[in-house]
Structure formats: C-alpha cells, structure tokens
Image (spheres, rainbow, N blue to C red):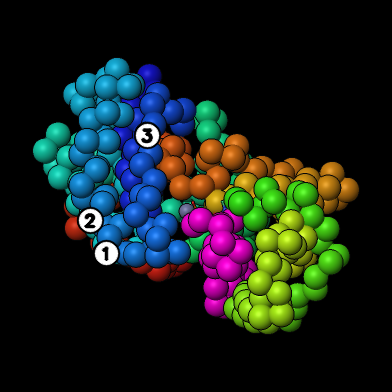
C-alpha cells in the first residue's frame, strides 16, 4: 500500500498544502498571498504572518477534500529551504508539531529539488542522472543531479530571472507578479524592435542585474520623451524583454548538456511555465535527442504537490528528518 503523506510548502508567498498517496496528490490547496501586490514584491514579515494565519485552516480543508483522517497518515513533509526564513519556520514548526503530536516520521524537503522532482508525479522512481534547470522568483541555477549527489554547475551571480520579470513587470504597470503577464503579452509583440544587453559571465552562470537596469533606464528615458511610450509599445517591449531574459537560459543549458554529456534535462520553477522557454527547449531537445521534462503549468509555480512528490521519494529511501532539523534560507549542497 502506498503511504499517505501531508506536505507543507511555506517558502515564499504561497501557503500550499497537499495530501499525497505515494507520488500522486489526493488533494491539494494553495493560498497565494495578495497583500504583497501593492509593494511590487514579497514582504518577508507579512508573508510569515499570513502563513501563520492560514496554515491550520488550509491543512484542515485539504484533509476534508482528500476525505482521509489524520490517523491514516504515514509521514509529514515540509519545505526546509531555501526560501524566506520566517515562512519556512512557520511551515517547519507546524510540521514538527503535528509529527510529534501524531507520532509520525518527519520528512524535510529541499524546495529546489522538489521543483525538479515534481516532474515525476505519479511515478515510482526518479530517472537519474539529469541536468536540472531551476528558474524561479528566487533562483536561476543549473544542477548536475545524480542518484546520491547534486552538484551546482552554475547560478545567477545576482538577481534571479523571475525577479527580473517581476521588476520589469512593475515598470510596465503590470500587477505583481509580472512574469506571466509579460509572457502572455509577448506573444503579440515583435522581439526585434528593442535590443537589451546579455551579460558575459563564466560558463553555466547568469547575471541579470545589468539587463534589468538597462531595461529600466531605457523605459524611463522613453517615458520622458513620450508619456504613452509604455502603453503604445507594450507588446513589443514584452517580446524583447522576454527574449533577452530567456536567451541566456537556453544558451547555458545547451552548454551544460554538451559538457556533462547528459541526455536528460529536467526543468522546474515558476519561469519554467514561460512559453518561449518551453518552445526553445522543446526545439533543442528534439534536435539533440534529449529527454525533456517540464511540469504542467500549475506545478511550475510553488505548490504543495511538489513537496509531496519529493517527500515520497525520500520516504521510499527512509530518509527521515530529526526533530532538531533546522530551516535554511540558502542551500547547503553538501547536505
Ligand atoms: O517557483 P515560483 O512560484 O517561486 C519561487 O520559488 O521563487 O516562481 C515564481 C516566479 C515569479 O517571478 C513569476 O513571475 C515567474 O515565476 N513566472 C513566470 C511565468 N509564470 C510565473 N515568468 C515568466 N513567464 C511565465 N509564464
Ligand atoms: Zn519555488
């Protein structure tokens, strides 16, 4: 019989809960915190307080939706990190409290690995080895993932790609988070209309702060000349911004696949939902004979199911956590 697992995700601005039967969700619910919209980004302290307010109610609702009792659970999983520490502590303390009270094993999950292994929802095994590309609001990272080891090949030296989508989204008057809005609007535009710089950094690494500033300076200058510049050029701006943010991801991923000689590419994180990124990766996968895994759109952005899927693979290996396990805002890959 497959285990029932309760999975808790609180690393950023989504309070997300899933009840899993093995690696398949029985029910899952998510509250996206709307109060950050007016600040144009996530305010960590507000996020933590909101997780605190909603978490118990959401766990209760998820149980009811799955139609199972707490006594049927086999383990409790939670996001240990990386993420915003306040929120992680709320989820971690809740998981520990419930596991202690119900006498259940505890499973701590790495949020970035979960963004990748959610691709194997409903499966019994993760097919190692693979190149992992995690592209989200907090991370842009290329990982060489083997059965017993995970090596960072490269990452962003400054902003994460999702963060730049959201910050440029603010400049274009889109509500937060702007990534998905830029992506949708870009499909109606011409990316050749505006040119932005691509940073030259060491192989497999990324840098987005330069292009972020270049976009901001360009838009501010154009707005001084013409009040309606953004309104009248929105689709073309979105297409160009998307192009210059996605190109480095494609280029470094191809390089990493070639150098590592891996044949399997696994992608995850909110920006994995990007239409251009998906289109280009599918094209190269076909051309180069790679096996490509991209999650369904609703499992790209933060969700409880990804924590549950990774927890199931850890449960199978009996990789349980101690009650003194500590949440971390940044990853320690030696773990
Ligand atoms: O994985 P995620 O939910 O949270 C983190 O772990 O950071 O990713 C959220 C990020 C946001 O920056 C959001 O704008 C971006 O993913 N995002 C997108 C798209 N959908 C979500 N960026 C570009 N294109 C999209 N379609
Ligand atoms: Zn995430």
Spatial CA distance of label 3 from label 1 is 22 Å
Residue tagged 3: 29
Residue closest to the eye, 249 or 80: 249
Residue tagged 1: 45
Please say whether residue 263 is visible from this viewpoint. no
What residue is at 74 percent from the left and 56 percent from the top?
Answer: 235
Spatial CA distance of label 1 from label 2 is 6 Å
**In the image: residue 85, left or right of residue 12:** left
**Magenta-tinted stretch:** 151-179
Residue tagged 2: 49
Q: Name, please, the residue furthest toward the left.
A: 101
Q: Mark 1 touching mark 2, by CB under 8 A?
A: yes
Q: Secondary structure at mark 3?
A: strand
Residue 57: x and y, percent?
22, 35
Residue 71: x and y, percent?
19, 24
What residue is at 55 percent from the left and 73 percent from the top?
Answer: 159
Q: Secondary structure at mark 2?
A: helix
Specify the quadrant of the image occupied by residue 218: bottom right
**In the image: residue 149, left or right of residue 1:** right
Is label 1's Cβ within 8 Å of ligand 1?
A: no
Q: Is residue 158 magenta?
A: yes
The quarter of the picture where the N terminus appears is top left
Residue closest to the eye, 206 or 56: 56
Q: Earlier in the sequence, mark 3 or mark 2?
A: 3
């Amino acid at each position: 019989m497959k285990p029932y697992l309760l999975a808790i995700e609180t690393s950023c601005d989504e309070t997300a809960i899933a009840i899993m039967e093995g690696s398949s969700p029985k029910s899952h619910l998510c509250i996206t915190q709307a109060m950050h919209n007016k600040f144009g980004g996530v305010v960590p302290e507000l996020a933590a307080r909101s997780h605190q307010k909603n978490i118990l109610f959401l766990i209760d609702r998820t149980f009811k939706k799955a139609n199972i009792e707490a006594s049927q659970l086999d383990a409790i999983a939670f996001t240990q990190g990386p993420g915003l520490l306040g929120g992680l502590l709320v989820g971690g303390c809740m998981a520990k409290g419930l596991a202690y009270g119900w006498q259940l094993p505890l499973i701590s999950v790495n949020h970035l690995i979960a963004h990748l292994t959610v691709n194997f929802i409903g499966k019994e095994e993760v097919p190692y080895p693979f190149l992992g590309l995690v592209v989200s609001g907090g991370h842009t990272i290329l990982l060489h993932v083997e059965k017993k080891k995970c090596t960072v090949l490269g990452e962003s030296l400054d902003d994460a790609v999702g963060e730049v989508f959201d910050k440029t989204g603010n400049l274009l008057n889109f509500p937060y988070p702007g990534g998905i809005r830029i992506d949708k609007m870009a499909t109606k535009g011409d990316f050749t209309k505006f040119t932005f710089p691509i940073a030259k950094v060491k192989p497999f690494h990324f840098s987005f702060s330069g292009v972020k500033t270049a976009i901001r300076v360009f838009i501010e200058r154009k707005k001084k000349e013409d009040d309606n510049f953004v309104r009248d050029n929105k689709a073309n701006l979105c297409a160009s911004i998307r192009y210059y943010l996605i190109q480095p991801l494609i280029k470094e991923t191809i390089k990493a696949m070639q150098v590592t000689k891996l044949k399997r590419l696994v992608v995850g994180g909110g920006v994995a939902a990007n239409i251009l990124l998906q289109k280009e990766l599918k094209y190269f996968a076909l051309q180069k004979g790679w096996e490509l895994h991209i999650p369904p759109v609703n499992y790209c952005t933060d969700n409880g199911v990804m924590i549950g899927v990774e927890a199931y693979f850890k449960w199978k290996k009996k990789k349980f956590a101690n009650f003194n396990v500590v949440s971390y805002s940044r990853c320690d890959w030696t773990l």
